[in-house]
Image: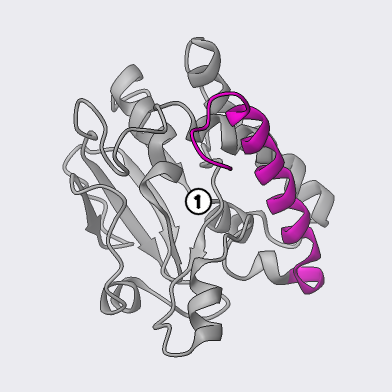
């Protein structure tokens, strides 16, 4: 999963300005779901001043069935994503169209929907749900899947009034803001080490500065 996330990050050349896709990112409706752990919802997300990854994306109510025909992305109210994390979603819509690439959700949303499965079963399910992104890397046809989870770690929405809160808000969490804290965050540390190592290997020989 870490290697897939890194590969998706490099779908666009690293020297391209953050958040810019040529052509611009296709429009998308973002559903901000209430977090079952902390209760964060769309109101808290918006009050924190967090921007959506791309200007072409807009928030719709979690229970609003009318998305104006746009593809949808479901996230929790306590998580945010950098634009590069959402590149595979934007590219999938651009490449395959909004009908084939119609619905996505974050890992945190997927974890809440998987319920009380054992940890290894959760990881196996997420890996399968994220396999659609392999088509972007290999040039294959987008597979038909009932659920497409975005292969991306998220970050915690936080007012960052203290240094500790700021650090928490910028630390990537591979299963979402709360699930990644399980086991005192040791699984999250392992994931981030693997992700960093994969990025270093990808950049080896091409980076203009130390990774």
Q: Residue 178 falls in which quadrant of the image?
A: bottom right
Write the residue at 20% across / 37% down: 69
- Identify the main secondary structure in magenta: helix
Expressed as whole percent of the image width and height from the top left, the position of residue 60 reads: 24, 58
**Colouring of the image:** one colour
Q: Which residues are magenta?
A: 182-211
Q: For the residue labelled by badge 1, is the local secondary structure a helix, a strand or a loop?
A: loop
Dot 1 crowding, Cα within 10 Å, few <14, some 14–19, many 20+: many
Residue 132, position as x, y percentages in the image: 55, 26
Image coordinates for residue 68, horizontal then vertical, percent: 16, 42
Image point (29%, 43%), residue name = 19
- Residue beneath label 1, please? 106
Which quarter shows the C terminus? top right
Q: Is residue 47 left or right of residue 123?
A: left
The answer to whether one can see residue 1 in this image is: no
On screen, residue 140 above or below 147? above
Q: Is residue 151 above or below residue 143?
A: below
The residue located at (43%, 77%) in the rendering is: 40
Quarter of the image holding residue 186?
A: bottom right
Of 93 and 82, nearer the camera is 82
Total numbered circles: 1
Residue 11 part of the magenta-drawn span: no
The quadrant of the picture occupied by the N terminus is top right
Residue ranking furthest to the front: 209
Residue 61 lies left or right of residue 104; in this view the side is left
Residue 188 on the magenta segment? yes
Q: Nearer the viewer, residue 42 or 165?
A: 165
User: x%, y% of residue 3?
Assistant: 67, 34
């Amino acid at each position: 999963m870490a290697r897939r996330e890194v590969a998706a990050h490099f779908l666009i050349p690293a020297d391209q300005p953050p958040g810019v896709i040529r052509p611009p990112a296709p429009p998308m409706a973002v559903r901000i779901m209430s977090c079952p752990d902390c209760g964060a919802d769309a109101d808290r997300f918006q009050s924190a001043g967090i921007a959506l990854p791309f200007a072409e994306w807009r928030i719709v109510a979690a229970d609003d069935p009318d998305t104006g025909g746009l593809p949808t992305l479901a996230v929790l109210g306590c998580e945010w994503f950098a634009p590069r994390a959402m590149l595979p979603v934007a590219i999938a819509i651009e490449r395959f169209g909004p009908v084939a690439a119609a619905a996505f959700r974050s890992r945190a949303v997927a974890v809440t929907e998987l319920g009380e499965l054992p940890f290894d079963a959760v990881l196996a399910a997420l890996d399968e749900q994220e396999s659609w992104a392999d088509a972007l890397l290999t040039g294959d046809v987008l597979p038909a899947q009932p659920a497409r989870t975005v292969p991306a770690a998220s970050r915690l929405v936080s007012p960052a009034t203290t240094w500790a809160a700021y650090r928490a808000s910028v630390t990537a969490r591979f299963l979402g803001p709360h699930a990644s804290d399980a086991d005192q965050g040791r699984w999250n540390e392992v994931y981030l080490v693997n992700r960093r190592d994969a990025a270093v290997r990808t950049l080896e020989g091409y980076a203009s500065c130390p990774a």
